């Protein structure tokens, strides 16, 4: 195998593929990057068995072939090369030679046939979603995925498509994030749990500004294939039945509060500094006669904030884990936020005013009277 390409192009391709590079594996071959040179392209593949990324970059192919290089070492070497064109040659003993300007590097590789083949995913169940939309759905829900839970389904993000609507849901037992968006209708309903390990990496590969870029999602049993231009993502889905989240969403409320998001966010941010110093990480909200009082306490001090709000319904006091409240205000992009409550121990719903398709459910923390 022998090819030439621009160093910057190779770096970009490696940055994409190595998002799936395995760090802890019982199969040492997955610590490498598979490179396949053919036609006028170089194919780079990385996998950790649950997530596989294959991306193609333009290259001048002088000799076709395939081989495996140590992933992290090769990426670091390429990143440090001088700018310009790099020439890569793999000899018969699978040793790779890199030449760029005055730099020469040799690195031992392995035979390409040792690497697992790309998964085969049928396109019978397929949908096209705008990349911008899918990226937004991921960014607005991934933070609520459970990090460690005996219920494996909660360590993933639920994607549902039906009735011309796509829904992405994540929850960890203490809070829930739900994002809905209109999309093309599908012949049969789609429901898939994408592992949390993969969902963040998928989001990073999606366009955040090209309104015309489309992601093609193909579902086949427990596998998902996402086609993005020159990059293909293969995901091993989480098996099992997701929690019936619609049943835990309250449908009526005793108190509605509308607050200026920037003011509310700043008050929460200041109160969070003291809350994190305490043993219980709590922020208390007191809603009374059109005013909201935000407080936090610790062994070394306390914070008291006040702000005007639009209030409909009864006064009440409620407390939240500081992390869950700050995650909400950081993810909402609107001028105002609506907070809907029933009492100090029932789930609270928070949503941007004017955007009912994005909501958070947060469980309060019981406090002693």
Image (cartoon, rainbow, N blue to C red):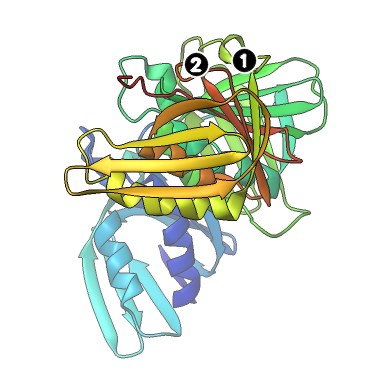
In the rendered view of the protein, which quadrant contains the C terminus?
A: top left
Q: How many marks?
A: 2
Mark 2: few/some/many CA within 10 Å (<14, 14-19, 20+): some
Relative horizontal placement of residue 111, taking residue 300 as reference (left or right): right
Q: Secondary structure at mark 1?
A: loop
330 or 85, nearer to the observer: 330
196 or 262, nearer to the observer: 262
Please name the residue that numbered disc 2 is placed on: 346
Q: Quadrant of residue 253?
A: top right
Q: Quadrant of residue 148?
A: top left
Expressed as whole percent of the image width and height from the top left, the position of residue 130 reads 73, 45
Q: Mark 1 touching mark 2, by CB under 8 A?
A: yes
Please name the residue that numbered disc 1 is placed on: 250
Relative horizontal placement of residue 242, taking residue 209 as reference (left or right): left
Expressed as whole percent of the image width and height from the top left, the position of residue 303 reads 34, 49
Any part of residue 44 in sight = no
The residue at the point 29 percent across, 37 percent down is 281
Relative horizontal placement of residue 26, taking residue 35 as reference (left or right): left
Relative horizontal placement of residue 279, taking residue 309 as reference (left or right): left
The residue at the point 62 percent across, 18 percent down is 191
In the rendered view of the protein, which quadrant contains the N terminus?
A: bottom left
Q: Indicate whether 115 appears above or below 314.
A: below
Q: Secondary structure at mark 2?
A: loop
Q: Indicate whether 174 appears above or below 196.
A: above
């Amino acid at each position: 195998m022998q090819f030439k390409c621009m160093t910057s192009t190779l770096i970009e391709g490696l940055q994409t593929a190595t998002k799936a590079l395995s760090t802890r594996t019982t199969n040492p071959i997955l610590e490498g990057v598979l490179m396949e040179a053919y036609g006028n392209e170089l194919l780079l593949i990385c996998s950790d068995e649950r997530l596989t990324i294959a991306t193609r970059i333009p290259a001048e192919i002088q000799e076709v072939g395939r081989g495996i290089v140590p992933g992290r070492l090769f990426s670091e070497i390429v990143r440090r090369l001088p700018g310009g064109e790099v020439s890569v040659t793999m000899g018969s003993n699978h040793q790779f030679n890199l030449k760029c300007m005055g730099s020469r590097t040799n690195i031992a590789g392995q035979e390409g046939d040792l690497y697992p083949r790309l998964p085969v995913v049928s396109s019978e169940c397929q949908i096209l979603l705008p990349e911008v939309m899918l990226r937004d759905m991921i960014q607005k829900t991934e933070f609520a995925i459970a990090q460690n839970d005996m219920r494996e389904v909660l360590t993933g993000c639920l994607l549902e498509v039906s009735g011309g609507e796509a829904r992405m849901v994540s929850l960890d037992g203490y809070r829930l994030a739900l994002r809905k968006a209109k999309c093309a209708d599908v012949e049969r309903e789609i429901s898939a749990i994408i592992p949390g390990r993969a969902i963040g990496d998928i989001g990073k590969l999606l366009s955040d500004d090209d309104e015309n870029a489309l992601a093609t999602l193909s579902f086949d049993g427990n596998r998902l294939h996402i086609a993005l231009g020159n990059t293909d993502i293969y995901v091993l889905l989480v098996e099992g039945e997701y929690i019936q989240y619609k049943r835990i969403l309250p449908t009526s409320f005793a108190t509605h509060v509308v607050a200026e998001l920037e003011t509310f966010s700043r008050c929460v941010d200041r109160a969070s500094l003291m809350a994190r110093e305490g043993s219980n990480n709590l922020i208390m909200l007191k809603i009374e006669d059109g005013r909201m009082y935000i407080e936090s306490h610790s062994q070394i001090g306390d914070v008291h904030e006040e702000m005007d709000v639009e209030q409909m319904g009864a006064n009440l006091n409620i407390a939240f884990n500081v992390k869950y409240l700050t995650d909400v205000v950081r993810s909402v992009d609107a001028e105002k936020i609506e907070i809907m409550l029933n009492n100090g121990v029932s789930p609270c719903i928070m949503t941007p005013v004017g955007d009912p398709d994005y909501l958070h459910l947060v469980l309060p923390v019981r406090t002693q009277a």
